[in-house]
Image (cartoon, grey):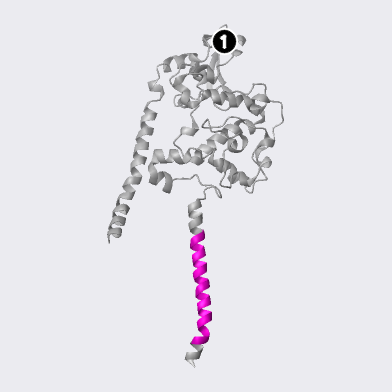
């Protein structure tokens, strides 16, 4: 009776408990979004006047100062900066001229200005206690050991993957795991799926991604459920996302590397997934209902496995004992029936 009453109470409050973290998460998301936006930027007017009046539009006007003639031109895709995306990125509060020199105020931009050395991540974030938790120095050390750096003599930079105008850290995004996987892989395919962009950093011929992964049982499903970097970077315990990209012949190429209790995915893709899910959505939502960090062969519990073996063994023992008992009593039963 007591157990039945406790069960009823639990079932009654379960939906309420499950919804509480989600409401809090939604409020946090709204608060975070309110902290960003063009209307809150102190430099929005200057950015529009100096840069985005051209680079923030797909079509811009150019005027010949001698003849006074004006005509419209299409902005090159790689020179277009979406104002909406910029003002929702981590660098939304910056002035364009915080990173680009005053020389870019002059139009057309001079060759000397266009060849200026750009800023790197460590120029702002390195060796600063404010950003110590993100371990930028360790990330930079990993990057300099990666094939991206060594094979291109440093021509491949952070910005090839993390555009400073749009960057938002996927590892701390509140979207679904599959969405974050898709966005992460888009970074890789931006170059590895486009020979023109690839040609900016290497003369190596681009090979198609899917044919290179035909050894997988179902390449499309694997690429939709796993990040490229989970197989192509060296595992690390010090940073949230590994940046030491390995050569292709050093990548993961066996099933057991992922589908086992020592799965690399538990140390890469899902390293923080379960913890973040519990922190953001609560235990009930984060662990029972919405936890998608499941990998066949990797999420086995020794306790559950042992319990299952015991239960199956008991069933087999009971069935065997019952069969033996029936065999033993059959002659006796026939004797009395006669």
Place of residue 40 in the rendered image (x, y in percent of width and height, measured from the top left): 38, 21
- Please name whichever residue, 75 or 135, is drawn nearer the observer in this view of the structure: 135
Badge count: 1
- The quarter of the picture where residue 115 lies is top right
Q: Secondary structure at mark 1?
A: loop
Percent across and percent down for residue 324 are: 53, 76
Q: Is residue 159 above or below residue 268?
A: above
| 62 sits left or right of 212 in the view | left
Magenta stretch bounds: 309-332
Q: Is residue 60 above or below residue 273?
A: above
Give the position of the N terminus as an image quadrant: bottom left
Asked if residue 41 lies left or right of residue 252, the reply is left
Residue at image coords 57%, 41%: 264
Q: Is residue 58 visible?
A: no
Q: Position of residue 130 (x, y in %)?
A: 44, 21
Of residue 172 and residue 316, the one placed in the foreground of this image is 316
Depth order, front residue of 146/56: 146
For image coordinates 52% across by 67% down, the residue present is: 316
State which quadrant residue 73 falls in: top right
């Amino acid at each position: 009776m007591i157990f039945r009453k406790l069960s009823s109470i639990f079932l009654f409050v379960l939906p309420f408990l499950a919804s509480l973290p989600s409401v809090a998460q939604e409020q946090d998301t709204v608060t975070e979004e309110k902290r960003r936006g063009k209307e809150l930027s102190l430099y929005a007017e200057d950015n529009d006047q100096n840069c985005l009046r051209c680079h923030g539009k797909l079509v811009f006007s150019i005027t010949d100062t001698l003849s006074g003639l004006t005509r419209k031109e299409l902005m090159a895709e790689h020179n277009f900066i979406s104002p909406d995306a910029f003002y929702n990125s981590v660098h939304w509060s910056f002035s364009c001229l915080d990173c680009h020199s005053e020389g870019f105020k002059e139009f057309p931009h001079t060759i000397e200005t266009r060849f200026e050395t750009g800023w790197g991540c460590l120029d702002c974030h390195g060796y600063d206690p404010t950003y110590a938790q993100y371990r930028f120095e360790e990330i930079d050390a990993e990057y300099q050991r990666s094939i991206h750096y060594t094979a291109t003599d440093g021509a491949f930079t952070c910005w090839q993957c993390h555009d400073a105008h749009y960057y938002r850290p996927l590892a701390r995004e509140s979207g679904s795991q599959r969405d974050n996987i898709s966005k992460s892989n888009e970074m890789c395919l931006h170059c590895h799926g486009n020979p023109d962009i690839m040609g900016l950093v290497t003369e190596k011929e681009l090979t198609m991604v899917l044919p290179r992964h035909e050894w997988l049982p179902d390449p499309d499903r694997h690429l939709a459920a796993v990040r490229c970097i989970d197989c192509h970077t060296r595992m690390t315990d010090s940073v949230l996302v590994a940046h030491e990209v390995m050569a292709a012949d050093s990548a993961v190429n066996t099933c057991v590397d992922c589908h086992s209790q020592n799965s690399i995915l538990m140390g890469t893709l899902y390293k923080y997934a379960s913890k973040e899910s519990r922190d953001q959505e609560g235990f009930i939502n984060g662990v029972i209902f919405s936890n998608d960090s499941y990998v066949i062969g990797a999420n086995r519990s020794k306790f559950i496995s042992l319990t299952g073996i015991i239960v199956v063994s008991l069933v087999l023992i009971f069935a065997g004992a019952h069969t033996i008992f029936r065999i033993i009593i059959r002659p006796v039963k026939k004797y009395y029936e006669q």
